[in-house]
Image (cartoon, grey):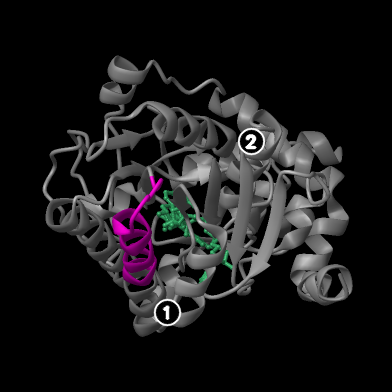
Amino acid sequence: MKILITGGAGFIGSHVVRLFVNHYPQYKIVNLDKLTYAGNLKNLTDIENKPNYKFIKGDICDAEFIQNLFATENFQAVIHLAAESHVDRSISNPLEFVITNVMGTVNLLNAARYQFQKEGATFQKFYHVSTDEVYGSLGKDGMFTETTAYDPHSPYSASKASSDHFVRAYHDTYKLPVVISNCSNNYGPYHFPEKLIPLAIHNIKNNKPVPVYGKGENIRDWLFVIDHARAIDTIFHNAQIGSTYNIGGHNEWKNIDVIELLCDIMDQKLGRPQGTSRALISFVKDRAGHDLRYAIDASKLQRDLGWMPSVQFAEGLESTVDWYLNNDVWLQEVTSGNYQNYYEEQYHKR
Ligand code: NAD
Ligand code: TDX
């Protein structure tokens, strides 16, 4: 099977690419990524020379390019992760999110549909990776299930909700074989340091203020990224066509509690007196339209397909801190912008 993975140079995509390349030597994995600021080929140096892996730089919004790519590569499946993913950026530039997340997804759906409908077609699956943010915000109680009504609040979540609707519409209208999953907040290695956990690690390490929006009372349900990649593997191989699965860690934390725990881990790792890093916490202006609470009910995934998270938060957070402290070069290259030269240096000349 030849599988197109989009957004494979990003945070979650790189873990999914690595898992598929390493676990399925019989598959051919094509990683298509535009290499926006969020795409980093240094996330994949350990597998870049594997015979079942190929990287292609390209834009999912470029309809002609995407049609040609499908025509030449004859993919049997797509795992679609490419997206603009940062809520704060969506507040300053919503249109970019519509273009990439909605139009880019529809472009891919069109190419997959053609591939699926052509004579002698072998196209099997379009797997769309989405987020719990499409369900909106919870109060103190309750959890998102697969049947919770969509109620997005940010331009990011509105664009992801729209893309989910298009994916379902292509299933209902053209019988395109689709699967969707909606996952909670991920954390772990290769997370771009604009997001809460890697930003805090970076700032604590450099004795800079750690910005906490509002009073830090918003709640997120954190899942270790490798558990998300495992869930995608399980769903890709076993889910019924047309189905949706929620993925989550049953691991709700107030932002301020995550940051305080992180400060304490960092003090210990850096040999600083306990309490030093907590002094860096700085409460700042709240995010506009800030969703209060997310919590995922992932029981359908456990019941139907036997998936469960395997990494406890304390363990995952500590190993994430260790990873960032041991991979200072990765972090420095990301913060300096040097990582963006890697494609020209390594790939363009090939
Ligand atoms: P990311 O921002 O780290 O990576 C996105 C990748 O997509 C980057 O490599 C980028 O270069 C690529 N990309 C962007 N626009 C593109 C385009 N036009 N053409 C081709 N490639 C393009 O994002 P992430 O955090 O890894 O998220 C991946 C997917 O998972 C997204 O669809 C996101 O909505 C979803 N998701 C993320 C989380 C999370 O906690 N990060 C949780 C649930 C779902
Ligand atoms: O500096 C910060 N201070 C702060 O308090 C940042 C960057 C964030 N926050 C808060 C906002 C959120 O309540 O921390 C929480 C987590 O923020 P992000 O890391 O930006 O993630 P979030 O907005 O929850 O969205 C993430 O999870 C769902 C991903 O970025 C999305 O792509 C995914 O769909």
Q: Position of residue 95 (x, y in %)?
A: 35, 84
Circle 1 Cα neighbour tier, 10 Å, few/some/many (<14 / 14–19 / ≥20)? some
- Give the residue type that dot 2 points to: Leu
Is 334 a magenta residue? Answer: no
Tell me which corner region of the image, top left, top right, bottom left or bottom right, holds residue 314. Answer: top right
Sequence-first disc among 1 and 2: 2
**Over which residues does the magenta segment extend?**
105-123
Q: Position of residue 62 (x, y in %)?
A: 47, 81
From the viewer's perspective, tell me whether residue 171 is left or right of residue 280.
left
As helix, strand or loop, the secondary structure at mark 1 comes to helix
Query: From this viewpoint, is residue 121 visible?
Result: yes
Circle 2 Cα neighbour tier, 10 Å, few/some/many (<14 / 14–19 / ≥20)? some
Query: From this viewpoint, is residue 207 visible?
Result: no
User: Would you say the beta carbon of the disc 2 residue lies within 8 angstroms of ligand 1?
Assistant: no
User: Depth check: 244 or 350 in front?
Assistant: 350
Is 122 a magenta residue? Answer: yes
From the viewer's perspective, tell me whether residue 172 is left or right of residue 324.
left
Residue identified by numbered label 2: 19
Residue identified by numbered label 1: 63
Q: What residue do we see at 21% from left, 38% from top?
A: 144
Residue 163 in the image: above or below residue 90: above
**Mark 1 and mark 2: Cα distance apart in space:** 28 Å
